[in-house]
Image (tube, grey):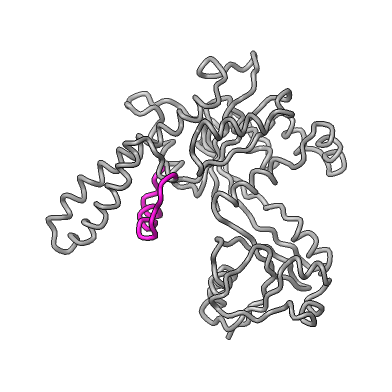
């Protein structure tokens, strides 16, 4: 999974990237390329506890790839506010974190001259709507030509209906993530990657004085956007960058002092999982304890395929115990004695935290 981090200049976007990935970015060097990329382990206390019990040779966390995209810049020779290069880079990400500046700093003026969370959120959203509208109009031109070709006529007619649905939403200033997309339409979303369909997480970069009231600020922003398919999370760039550089004991004291319950990494990844409809299952043993990321609703056979394609093709059964049952009884053998280690078939829908052992041919 790849999550792009976007934002206006001086929003704290690259600071967030550095915090999440525990890396230091040289701003001057960044300007010479258009993105920073880093793979991050997904923190999961359940995996930590399973590892402590099994003491395996290896622990493998699930991972997320974060991409820090160069700050949004206005295009010089286009009616578009943002450059086509930026929009192309954004299109390839599974989800987006939009870092929105909410802190005052006289030494680093806001590019628009003032702090306004909703204005900055709408600046990006409106540009995505315009880009998607231009794409839809381009598809209509192409599809009109395809209608004249007997071999492509049927598919063109189906796609025209999809594009009409999208066009109606966009003309009403609705992002595509906010409308009901049918299973048939999802093929087009996957192929064309419309920008306003991207799951969006707002990282509200607030000042130290906003910590106590951060949840109220977040709820107000969400109410004003009116988009139920956008999530938000407060973030305190300067404080959390310092946190990322501390050892665990110092970090715990520091977080308690500032009233921060979880690290930015845990909070934002948790929100990203919710947005994308993701969950984890585990495989355990003396050799390895590992967390695997799957879409909610995936079956045992589909989940087995995430481990290895042979496991999907030659799937027989899955031995399944829930994480909670395992932790209550202390071992898979004890779960089996209690009837809590079950044999499930290929259609079993895997639940978050399930411990699986795949039987295959």
Q: Residue at x 67, y 73 (%)?
A: 356
Question: In the figure, is residue 79 to the left or right of 357?
Answer: left
Q: Position of residue 322 (x, y in %)?
A: 71, 69
Using the image as rendered, state which of residue 230 and residue 188 is in the foreground: 230
Vertical arrangement, residue 124 with respect to residue 112, above or below: below
Which region is colored magenta?
A: 178-195
Q: Residue at x 84, y 40 (%)?
A: 252
Q: Position of residue 150 (x, y in %)?
A: 13, 62
Q: Residue at x 63, y 38 (%)?
A: 233
Main SS of residues in magenta: helix
Q: Residue at x 62, y 33 (%)?
A: 218
Q: Position of residue 124 (x, y in %)?
A: 46, 32
| Residue 258 is inside the magenta segment | no
Q: Looking at the rendering, which quadrant does residue 202 occupy?
A: top right
Vertical arrangement, residue 242 with respect to residue 190, above or below: above
Vertical arrangement, residue 61 with respect to residue 213, above or below: below
């Amino acid at each position: 999974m790849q999550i792009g981090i976007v934002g206006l200049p001086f929003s704290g976007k690259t600071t967030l990237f550095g915090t999440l990935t525990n890396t230091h970015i040289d701003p001057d060097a960044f300007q010479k390329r258009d993105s920073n990329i880093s793979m991050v382990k997904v923190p999961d206390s359940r995996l930590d506890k399973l590892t402590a019990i099994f003491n395996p040779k290896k622990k493998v966390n699930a991972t997320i790839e974060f991409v820090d995209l160069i700050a949004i810049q206005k295009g010089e020779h286009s009616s578009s506010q943002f450059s086509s290069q930026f929009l192309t880079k954004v299109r390839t990400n599974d989800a987006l974190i939009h870092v929105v500046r909410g802190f005052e700093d006289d030494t680093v003026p806001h590019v628009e001259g003032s702090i306004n969370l909703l204005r900055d959120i709408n600046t990006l959203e409106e540009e995505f709507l315009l880009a998607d509208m231009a794409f839809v109009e381009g598809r209509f031109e192409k599809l009109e030509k395809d209608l004249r070709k007997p071999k492509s006529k049927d598919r063109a007619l189906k796609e025209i209906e999809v594009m009409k649905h999208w066009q109606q939403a966009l003309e009403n200033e609705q992002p595509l993530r906010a409308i009901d997309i049918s299973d048939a339409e999802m093929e087009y979303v996957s192929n064309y990657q419309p920008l306003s369909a991207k799951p969006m997480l707002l990282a509200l970069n607030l000042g130290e004085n906003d910590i106590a009231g951060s949840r109220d600020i977040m709820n107000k922003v969400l109410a004003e956007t009116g988009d139920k398919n956008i999530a938000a999370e407060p973030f305190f760039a300067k404080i959390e960058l310092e946190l990322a550089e501390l050892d665990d004991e110092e970090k715990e004291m520091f977080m308690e002092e500032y009233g921060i319950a979880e690290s930015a990494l845990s909070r934002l990844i948790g929100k990203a999982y919710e947005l994308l409809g993701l969950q984890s299952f585990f495989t355990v043993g003396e050799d390895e304890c590992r967390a695997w990321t799957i879409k909610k609703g995936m079956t045992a056979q589909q989940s087995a395929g995430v481990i290895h394609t042979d496991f999907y093709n030659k799937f027989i059964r899955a031995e399944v115990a829930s994480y909670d049952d395992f932790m209550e009884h202390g071992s898979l053998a004890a779960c089996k004695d209690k009837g809590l280690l079950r044999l499930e078939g290929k259609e079993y829908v895997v639940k978050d935290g399930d411990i699986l052992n795949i039987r295959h041919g």
